[in-house]
Amino acid sequence: MKLANIKREWWKEAVVYQIYPRSFQDSNGDGIGDLRGIINRLDYIKSLGIDVVWLNPCYESPNDDNGYDISDYRTIMSEFGSMDDFDELLNAMHERGLKLVMDLVVNHSSDEHEWFKQSRQSRDNPYRDYYHWWPVEKGKPPARWSYFDKKGDAWKYDAQTNAYYLHYFSEKQPDLNWENPTLRKEIYDMMHFWFKKGIDGFRMDVITFISKHDDYPEFEAAYQNQNMIDMYAQGPRLHEYLQEMHSEVLSHYDIMTVAEGPGTHAHNVLDLVDESRQELNMNYHFDHQSIGVGPRFIINDDFQNLVKFKSVMSTWDKALSTKGWNTIYFGNHDFPRMVSRWASDAPEFRAAASKMLSTYLLSMRGTPYYYMGDEIGMSNIKFDDINDYNDLMTINWYHLTKEEGGDTQALIDSHKITARDNARTPIQWDSTDNAGFTTGKPWLKVNPNYIDINVAEQQNRQDSELNYFRKMVNVRKDNLILVYGSYTLLYDEHTQLYAYTRELDGKRLLVLLNFSDQMLEESLLEGIKIGNIVVNNYPEFNFDAKVFKLMPYQAVIVNILD
Ligand code: NOJ
């Protein structure tokens, strides 16, 4: 791989840090994180060495789905502050050389958005076609699956006009009708509004779902229930809409875009991110996250199957090796804590495991998206009681399982590992009350392990997870090979070891990661001679000319000698 042949871009070289504002820092004692809280923590954010912040939705919302149900796209949610706070945040970030990427949620709005209030009033309201309606005279609409509906039904009957409306998410999140050019223009105008303020990009919520199949045909049996996701992502006009969005809006600014792409796979991702198609820069997929996770987030034995994980990640790397650009992430607000999901949160392993996972994220090809709190190795809270949950997904599935006479304990046990609320507990800043997150009552319980795991404790401890993360960010910045170099998987079938080389302009690095809680010893492959150590999450690395040994969750990057 030659650097001279690669089109360098700032967003390819950036490290993205995601902030879920509700849980980051409360500044006014109402128990809910807010924009001023983020402003107060900007020096910390800058100290991480990251370049871009992706901020989850902070627009006005009734919060049925924590801000993913927007009732006004041009106003800041009152719980989070005001537009003045937002402007101050954006300025203060830019002054520090940080970029801000906002969330664009335009597959659906809130049912409390003025558009929907109008739309549901009468069949001939000018806003009627802003949403998807199915009049009862046509009979029952063809089945559509909903993520958040209590019964999984995406059609909700609305008596006022005797018709059903479509909602792929909760019934308070009606899907917008992109077929309507007036609606599309409203969305593009709104995007210009934010870009004119100076934001640096959008992460586009379930953007793959915006085009619906004309006349809502019945889907084949293979695409029933949750499997509809793949059909949802193949709407007939998706690429036409994204190309239109590109020419109307995106092409006017130096910004980055990333699709949240449920239903994207290695075989079709280039349709979205091949630069010659003029759609989006990047996409993030769910293929690794869904390993070992069944319906209602019940896990099975494959949950931590490393061989499958390596295969998925390597397939994706290959798909985007010459065109487009990949993303790499383990956690976000929709998944459990990375250390609990992908390694171990057992007290004796958690710190090493967290550093090992940071090494992985920051040494793969593709832009790393790093979720707040992972830098200190925060772990799952593992609620025992359904009443502790806030997330409508867990709550709905619990009640549905109960109504069906199913095994609610199995659901609770799995959700201790998989639930979204595990990642939404407040950031653990210090060991004072509520982990320094709020002086009030936190909207979601703080993980009791904050006494030991917190930013203040790790800030000045040289070997902390936090300082390791900072070091790894620098290692990536100092080694363009980790950004652009080609990736070659080694030991594909190994069940504990994830090893690969990165190569650029003839220079090669070897990355060795022990994804298990057991020591391992392995022979070096032909042609690989270990040179000096670039980074190591343990004090020692044990190797000779033939073999190397890794401690549980050890991560090492070394130069390969010619
Ligand atoms: C994906 C978001 O990340 C998630 O939090 C949200 O619930 C759904 N899209 C619906 O907007």
Image (cartoon, rainbow, N blue to C red):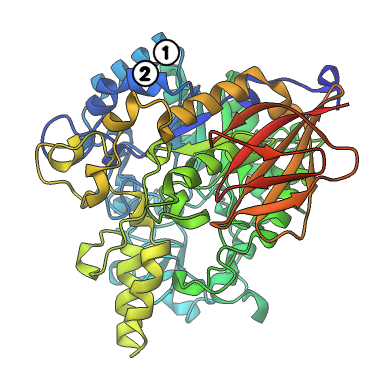
Up-down relation of residue 302 to residue 476 (above or below): below
Residue 147 seen from this side: yes
Q: Is residue 181 left or right of residue 384?
A: right
Quadrant of the image containing the N terminus:
top right
Q: Position of residue 421 (x, y in %)?
A: 33, 56
Q: Amino acid at mark 2?
A: Leu
Does the closest atom of ligand 1 sit within 8 Å of the Cβ of label 1? no
Q: Is 79 on the left-hand or right-hand side of 379? A: left
**Circle 1 sits on which residue?**
94
What is the x, y in percent for residue 180?
A: 53, 48
Q: x, y percentage for residue 488? A: 80, 42
Which residue is nearer to you in this view: 502 or 100? 502
Kindly identify the amino acid type of the residue bearing the numbered disc 1: His
Q: Is residue 293 left or right of residue 283?
A: left
Residue at image coords 65%, 81%: 221
- Quarter occupied by residue 194: top left
Q: Which mark is residue 90?
A: 2
Quadrant that contains the C terminus: top right
